[in-house]
Image (spheres, rainbow, N blue to C red):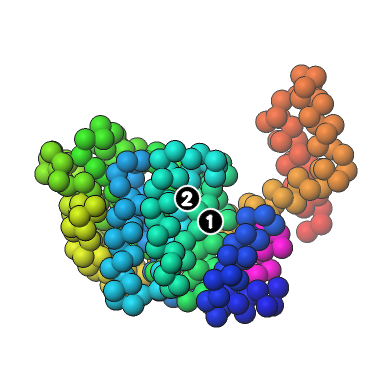
């Protein structure tokens, strides 16, 4: 473990890959590594890129990384698939195009599945970001696929959230209604060489102006055509401006909120794992399943009874 952690801290690609694999396959063992790496995190700028399938996120990320590399920035990319690494199709095609960046030794790319995690992003993804941060990457990009409510989970990880839309998809406005409006720090209308790109920009700006909240940061709406490398520099400039904004104003608040969220999620996970492990060890889980199958109880009542018993025990030991 010590060798693995030291390898990550030195930016060794093999150590980074092995640690992320450990995170995916053995979270309990990986936690030892994360605990040691955590003190070395907090230096990277985490950028979330989200939006509907077909909006050209992967091509846009490729252009962004090329621009970042021209500025000698070291980059990590986590590409998150909705549920399974076997989804294939268009997702796989996008990822293969992005893999061309992996010949650059200062760029590390990893594709991960959400594994049906509530909120869209698995704990493994969050820990993988920490690994890349601790390894010395200046920028870590997290790409999520889709445009549903589950994708808003990216805000718990990223400093800057970029929402990518494209004219002609037919669901861009619907995507905004689904919750994307609240999470975007920057909105991008990609594939701007298509018809109705200007109308899409106006629609988004109108919806932003309808927001009753008066934030100091007003999300810009910009046009890009990633296939022609148009608008990439402007997008990166806006990302850098947002980072400067965070450093000036609410960075302490944002850090505190993220730390609190992470702590609460860790407590929930530990508590759940502890209860389930105990039930399995004592054979009680199987007995409860039998009762549910026999219609002697239901899952919610069984859970209520279990929690009540645990809380009684907790109060007794105080």
Q: CA distance from mark 1 to mark 2?
A: 8 Å
User: Which residue is depicted at the point 50% across and 54% down?
Assistant: 111
**What residue sits right under mark 2 in the picture?**
80
Residue 101 horizontal/vertical position (percent)? 39, 63
Q: Which tag, 1 or 2, sits closer to the chain's start?
A: 2
Where is residue 20 drawn, in percent x and y?
A: 59, 62
Q: Residue at x 26, y 35 (%)?
A: 169
In what quadrant of the picture does the N terminus appear? bottom right
Is 181 displayed left or right of 20 in the figure?
A: left
The residue indicated by pointer 1 is 125
Q: Secondary structure at mark 2?
A: strand
Which secondary structure class fits the magenta region best? Answer: helix
* Label 1 close to label 2 by CB (< 8 Å): yes
How dense is the environment of label 2, judged by Cα within 10 Å: few (below 14), some, or many (20 and up)?
A: many
- The residue positioned 85% from the left and 31% from the top of the image is 287
Q: What's drawn in magenta, residue-wise?
A: 27-34
Number of marks in picture: 2
Tell me which corner region of the image, top left, top right, bottom left or bottom right, holds residue 186. Answer: bottom left
């Amino acid at each position: 473990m010590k060798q693995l952690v030291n390898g990550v801290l030195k930016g060794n690609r093999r150590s980074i890959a092995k640690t992320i694999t450990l995170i995916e396959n053995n979270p309990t063992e990986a936690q030892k590594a994360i605990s040691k790496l955590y003190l070395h995190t907090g230096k990277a700028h985490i950028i979330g890129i989200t939006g509907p399938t077909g909006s050209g996120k992967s091509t846009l990320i490729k252009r962004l990384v090329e621009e970042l590399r021209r500025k000698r920035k070291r980059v990590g990319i986590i590409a998150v698939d909705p549920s399974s690494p076997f989804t294939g199709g268009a997702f796989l095609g996008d990822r293969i195009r992005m893999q061309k960046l992996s010949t650059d030794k200062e760029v590390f790319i990893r594709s991960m599945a959400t594994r049906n995690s509530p909120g869209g992003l698995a704990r493994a993804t969050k820990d993988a970001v920490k690994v890349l941060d601790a390894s010395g990457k200046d920028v870590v990009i997290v790409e999520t696929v889709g445009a549903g409510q589950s994708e808003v989970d990216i805000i718990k990880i990223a400093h800057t959230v970029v929402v990518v839309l494209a004219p002609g998809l037919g669901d861009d406005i619907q995507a905004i209604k689904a919750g994307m409006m609240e999470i975007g720090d920057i909105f991008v209308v990609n594939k701007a060489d298509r018809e109705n790109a200007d109308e899409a920009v106006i629609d988004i700006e109108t919806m932003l102006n309808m927001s009753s909240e008066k934030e100091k940061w007003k999300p810009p709406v910009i046009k890009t055509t990633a296939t022609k490398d148009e608008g990439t520099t402007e997008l990166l400039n806006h990302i850098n401006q947002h980072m400067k904004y965070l450093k000036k104003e609410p960075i302490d608040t944002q850090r505190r909120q993220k730390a609190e969220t992470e702590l609460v999620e860790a407590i929930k996970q530990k508590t759940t794992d502890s209860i389930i492990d105990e039930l399995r060890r004592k054979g009680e889980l199987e007995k409860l399943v039998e009762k549910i199958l026999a219609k002697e109880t239901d899952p919610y009542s069984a859970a209520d009874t279990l929690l009540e018993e645990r809380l009684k025990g907790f109060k007794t030991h105080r």
